[in-house]
Image (tube, rainbow, N blue to C red):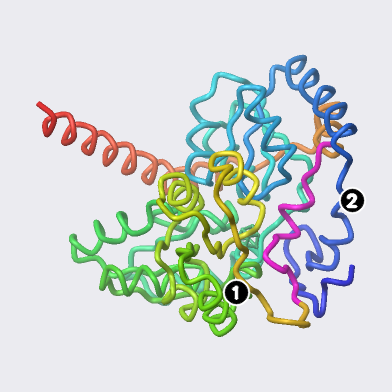
């Protein structure tokens, strides 16, 4: 595909997983009429199989719509984990990338977890192989190991805490208040942002997201001059030159909230452009401008859209429901060890939410 100037290629346990291979498997968009037909078929299959669809904001808009129309959810990775764990359905279908399916399986081992494709991976996961990460941890036994959700089950099995971009600041602040030094993996940009915001002692793995790493500071500055009234919304996996120009830095949920609740009429958005679908639905009168990636005439690996997320489609979902495969599997020893860091995060965030609700209730009384 012509958007690939150079490939990102890494081997993982499942073989070669470069962006070229991912883009080659991204289906052509379907017409609105065909989408309706495919959605109806997928909805029937979900019902027949007693399955619920859990989708990420970056996947195809038709999949997001289908999830909402059939009682599933569209959310960030924190809420995907929570929703899948708490839902009564015995079959979860995760439209996203592999670590999201693994997280669902780790939290709900008794459930069947299906994915439209298990080849949908993530450069952060690929860039943090289990053996090298274990050696890094072994070399720093005095540090609390905090890993981002975008890691394999094997890496999570080695961690003390898992975090997502929506709770990382709170959890790192909590660990800092206990005097703990942190080993952070794998996203170096998010790690630097958290370090600057909290002042915590973070020793960092040097991974990055191929989508967010491509947003460019200089081009963003030029765009801001063109649209001085537009607040800049940035996901913290982006480089410092981009984060430094942000009016809002936050998780996908936080960026959507900023558009919905903001007073401005237009916004510059620096995250995967799959998020624009939900933003447009929730704030139809607002204008959304994509932040620049590699600049005029340049090419890039992702052009603000994740090829692995884009591999998920209505057709691959239908096939997966018909076949009951591919199903996510995590060996039981790894699962038990990985579950601890995820449950710790979910318990922490639930407790914080309860405290906030109590505080606001008391304030109103
Ligand atoms: S957008 Fe980036 S962090 Fe998210 S799955 Fe794709 S490569 Fe990974």
Locate residue 267, reporting x and y percent: 52, 60
Q: Nearer the viewer, residue 261 or 209?
A: 261
Residue at 69% x, 81% y is 295
Of pointers 1 and 2, the one earlier in the residue sequence: 2
Residue 3 is labelled as none
* Picture quarter with the C terminus: top left
Left or right: 291 in relation to 144: right
Residue numbers of the magenta segment? 300-314
The image shows residue 237, relative to residue 74, as above or below, that is: below
Q: Nearer the viewer, residue 213 or 21?
A: 213
Residue 29 part of the magenta segment: no
Residue 215 is labelled as 1
Asked whether the beta carbons under mark 1 and mark 2 sit within 8 Å of each other, the answer is no
Dot 2 alpha-carbon crowd within 10 angstroms: few under 14, some 14 to 19, many 20 or more = few
Residue at 54% x, 39% y is 282
Tell me the residue that label 2 is attached to. 28
Q: Nearer the viewer, residue 32 or 206?
A: 32
């Amino acid at each position: 595909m012509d958007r690939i100037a150079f490939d990102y290629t890494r081997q993982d346990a499942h073989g070669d997983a470069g962006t070229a291979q991912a883009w080659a498997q991204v289906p052509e968009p379907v017409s609105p009429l065909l989408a309706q037909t495919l959605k109806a078929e997928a909805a029937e299959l979900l019902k027949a199989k007693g399955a619920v669809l859990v989708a990420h904001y970056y996947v195809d808009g038709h999949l997001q719509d289908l999830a909402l129309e059939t009682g599933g959810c569209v959310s960030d990775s924190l809420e995907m984990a929570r929703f899948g764990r708490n839902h009564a359905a015995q079959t979860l279908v995760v439209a996203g990338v592999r670590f999201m399916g693994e997280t669902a399986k780790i939290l709900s081992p008794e459930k069947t977890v299906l994915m439209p494709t298990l080849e949908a991976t993530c450069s952060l996961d690929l860039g943090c192989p289990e053996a090298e990460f274990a050696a890094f941890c072994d070399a720093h036994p005095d540090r609390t190991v905090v890993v981002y959700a975008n890691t394999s089950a094997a890496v999570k099995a080695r961690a003390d805490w898992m975090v997502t971009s929506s709770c990382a600041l709170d959890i790192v602040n909590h660990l800092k208040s206990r005097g703990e030094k942190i080993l952070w993996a794998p996203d170096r940009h998010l790690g630097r942002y958290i370090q600057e915001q909290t002042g915590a002692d973070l020793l960092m793995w040097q991974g990055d997201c191929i989508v967010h790493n491509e947003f460019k500071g200089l081009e963003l500055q030029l765009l801001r001059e063109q649209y001085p009234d537009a607040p800049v919304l940035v996901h913290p996996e982006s480089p410092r030159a981009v984060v430094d120009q942000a009016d809002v830095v936050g998780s996908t949920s936080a960026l959507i909230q900023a558009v919905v609740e903001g007073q401005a009429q237009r916004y510059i958005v620096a995250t995967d452009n799959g998020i624009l679908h939900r933003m447009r639905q929730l704030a139809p009168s607002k204008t959304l401008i994509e932040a620049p990636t590699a600049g005029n005439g340049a090419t890039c690996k992702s052009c603000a859209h994740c090829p692995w997320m884009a591999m998920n489609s209505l057709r691959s979902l239908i096939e997966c429901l018909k076949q009951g495969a591919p199903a996510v599997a995590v060996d039981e020893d790894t699962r038990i060890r990985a579950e601890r860091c995820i449950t710790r995060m979910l318990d922490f965030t639930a407790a914080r939410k309860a405290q906030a609700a109590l505080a606001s209730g008391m304030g109103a009384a």
